[in-house]
Amino acid sequence: MTPLRVQRIMMSIILISGLLLDLNNVEWGKYLIWFVAFMALFAGITGFCPSDKILMKITGKDKFC
């Protein structure tokens, strides 16, 4: 599995968890959603995402796609 697929799966799990927590009135559920949103924005603007580097090392693949 490529690092990009792993990252997308992780992002969706975190977003769904945050939504479910927020719907069940758990206060910090919305912070998970904001965290993913800001990290995606930061990665888009700067071109650097820490999860890219970590997932490339874990999967042993040099290219992201």
Image (cartoon, rainbow, N blue to C red):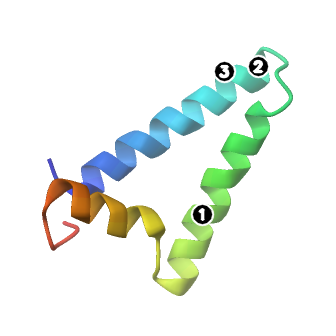
Mark 2 residue crowding within 10 angstroms, few (<14) / some (14–19) / many (20+): few
Which residue sits at x=17%, y=55%?
59
Spatial separation of the CA atoms under disc 3 and disc 1: 20 Å
Mark 3 residue crowding within 10 angstroms, few (<14) / some (14–19) / many (20+): some
Mark 1 residue crowding within 10 angstroms, few (<14) / some (14–19) / many (20+): some
Spatial separation of the CA atoms under disc 1 and disc 2: 22 Å
Identify which amino acid the numbered label 1 is placed on: Met
**Vertical order, 12 against 50 (above or below):** above
Q: Position of residue 2 (x, y in %)?
A: 17, 54
Spatial separation of the CA atoms under disc 3 and disc 2: 5 Å
Name the residue tied to disc 2: 23
Name the residue tied to disc 3: 20
Disc ID at residue 39: 1
- Evaluate if marks 3 and 2 touch, with contact meaning CB atoms under 8 Å apart: yes
Identify which amino acid the numbered label 2 is placed on: Leu
Q: How many numbered marks appear?
A: 3
Q: Can you tell which quarter of the image residue 9 is in?
A: top left
Q: Position of residue 60 (x, y in %)?
A: 13, 61
Q: Is residue 44 left or right of residue 62?
A: right
**Which of the two residues, 65 or 61, is positioned nearer the viewer here?**
61
**Vertical order, 30 against 58 (above or below):** above
Q: Is residue 14 left or right of residue 37?
A: left
